Image (tube, rainbow, N blue to C red):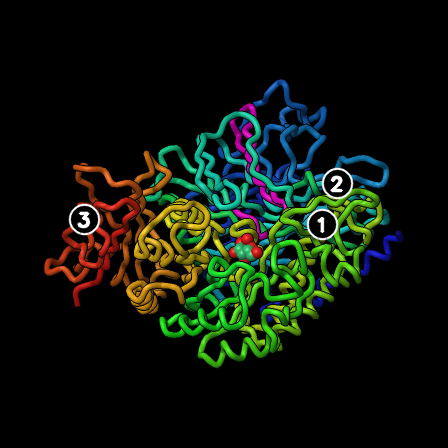
Amino acid sequence: MQVSALENTFNLDETFPRSAHQPKHRKESPKLAIHVDEKNQTFHLQTDHTSYIFQVLAHGILAQVYYGKKIHVKPQYPDLLQHEMKTDTPAYSLDEPTFQKGDLKQEYADTGTGDFRRPAYQVSQANGSRITDFQYDHYEVVQGKKRLPGLPSTFDDTEDDAETLIIHLTDQLIQLDLELSYTVFPHQDVIVRSANFKNHGVEPVTLEAALSAQLDLPDKHYDLIQFSGTWARERHLIRTPLRSGIQALDSVRTTSSPQQNPFMMLARPNTTDDAGDVFGFNLIYSGDFLDQVEVDQWDVSRVLVGINPSEFEWQLAPDKEFQTPEAILSYTADGMNQLSQQLADFYGKHLVDPKYRRMERPILVNNWEATYFDFDEPKLLTIAKQAKKLGIEMFVLDDGWFGHRDDDHTSLGDWFVDQKKLPDGIGAFAGEVHNLGLEFGLWFEPEMISIDSELYQKHPEWLIHAPKRRATPGRNQYVLDFSRPEVVDYIYEMMSQVIEDTKLDYIKWDMNRYITEMFSANLPADRQLEMPHRYILGVYNLYERLTKAYPDVLFESCASGGGRFDLGMMYYAPQAWTSDDTDAVERLKIQFGTSYGYPQSMMGAHVSAVPNEQTGRITSLETRANVAFYGAFGYELDISKMSDEEAEQVKEQVAFYKQHRALYQFGKLYRLDSPFDGDGNVMSWVVVDDQQDHAIATRYQLLNHPNAPYDRLYLRGLNPDKQYRINDSEETYYGDELMNAGIFVGSEFDDSVTVKQSADFSSRRFMINVVK
Ligand code: GLA
């Protein structure tokens, strides 16, 4: 295949997302975030509380100087660049025996010229050489932050003082330009980095690695905190000290994956939720990623964040460019609660579609665990009517409404209604739901194809497979080649039809398998490694077009639960199904772990039936709700089959949640007791409003112990000088008292609890309200 055939790819300019805001060259203002010392070529990026500094050294090499708590601006910081001459490191040249790349903290390192740590990029050239020599050329500073074409990315529509520094480097020999971009978001203490390669030469080059960010920290005294797991056990916190060598979290599944999440932290050993130094890293990307820390022989710790090079290559023809996804870097000296809060604030203002920033998410009922594939119109309408009675706001029809899908072997790709189940069509059914006064949502799995489908009859070649080889099924299904624009076009048309027929309010976009036999008939042999990234660009292209064409549809992403819980998805779909594990006890760890890197408003959390479908565990309706309240709340059980008493309880829960939903979804979250600490028997957290007038704390206990020791709950985030009541108590308490002396965990404030404290899996809610 000719390279020109590849021009048949997504037109990134056309898909430039909601590009209202174009950056302007900055006006001089007293609040500059980017300080440049022209003489010493020192760049000092300052946020409200942090400094990020690098400098251009001899030969145009960029050296990392400092990242951490804010320090004063100076022309340069020679002490921070000090290193000793080491005998086993190659020198830059015969004349400069002490200039050794391998001993420098570099900003975006190459390989093969003296630095033996893993590089930030690698470029192979027409002659087979992979040596490059990028040298600093010039810089520019622009005000604001523009979105990236074709990729989910940060933006500054709020005129929140963001400034972007672009460093231009060139490799003269092959005329390859490299732009390193740094946007400083001063008020959230976030720096967003990415890289862009532009080929101005006459021959193509191939990027074999192009990471988004590198950070060389001067020591190794950090704990790596990662969020790992698998299906139904997503984002469990693991904390381990850094050690010599490489520690990596990654995915090669073409999803960000439940096995490792792209969010990672580096914290000092004594850092807690409440205090201490911590860095957070994440990537705005939903495919194969790499988060890596390499501790070298001098205990310098190199962090790399970006697309996983092991499943990546990108050919750059002359005049073409490649833009990496964006990496998020954030730091605080005030502990992990502060880090999570500044990130949540940041995503709300600069990543999520502005209309969802503080939009309270609808309370929904989803029929999946209520009916699975076994439903018809009367059954669904019974649930919907009951939902309306209980005050629920949206009915979501999950898997099984299309083709002839009575189990998970068939019909993916056939996005038209199964008239056996819904005889009058999907539009008419949606009309019935709307007439009840409910919003209507539908499940899709747009990237998939079943062999037993009309789509496969028409387009067997669209199924991802390697020529003449067996294709590996996953959940009895296969994946469409989303790197091909015609496939994305086709699915777009089918989905549009349904969205318009149903006047749809919400889409649950699922993705239930990892990709195998990664190969595209659309790509020539030497470009097959472009496929994983091209696939993700196809997914983003479909999201982009749908969100643009149907701006009122709320998207919830899902990948067998929380398998694609990442910032790339968050850009298009402000909420995500956190896990297929709906057991309240399992959800404690899952939601607690998730909360480190992602806001509550993103976490889809539903009350489901007991015994629980995944664990068989029985928990009270009250505990199930107390867990699910800390997210985008809903129900996932047959509410039409509940006892009157249970239905009444649900009605109360719904009414209660509506009253406090803004606080649960957008309040500042403080983790108080971690289920990952000790025996994990207790977990608690609190959400606090912006005025520090209202807070809701919940303490969950797994197993009950007789004659248990006394326990106190130490609140956070209150105003020390304000007085509060707890659960309408007579007595009032100062904020400082509640935070420093804590609440006695007895039955004293426990008037909302119907399950006795003696029960296993109990939960206790503390409503904290300022005294007027
Ligand atoms: C996945 C999702 C579930 C449900 C099923 C339907 O497992 O995570 O919530 O939608 O698919 O097949």
Ligand 1 has an atom within 8 Å of the beta carbon of the residue at disc 3 = no
On the picture, is 576 further left or further right than 522?
A: left
Q: Are marks 1 and 2 in contact (CB under 8 Å)?
A: yes
Q: Amino acid at mark 1?
A: Phe
Pick the residue in front: 163 or 418.
418
Residue receiving disc 2? 123
Judged from this view, the residue extending furthest toward the bottom is 435
Q: Alpha carbon of mark 3 to alpha carbon of mark 1: how far?
A: 56 Å
Q: Alpha carbon of mark 1 to alpha carbon of mark 2: how far?
A: 10 Å
The stretch of residues the image draws in magenta is 281-307
Ligand 1's quadrant: bottom right
Residue visible at 45% across and 79% down? 436
Residue receiving disc 1? 197
Name above or below for residue 195 compared with residue 555: above
Q: Are marks 2 and 3 in contact (CB under 8 Å)?
A: no
Q: Nearer the viewer, mark 2 or mark 3?
A: 3
Q: Alpha carbon of mark 2 to alpha carbon of mark 3: how far?
A: 59 Å
Disc assigned to residue 523:
none
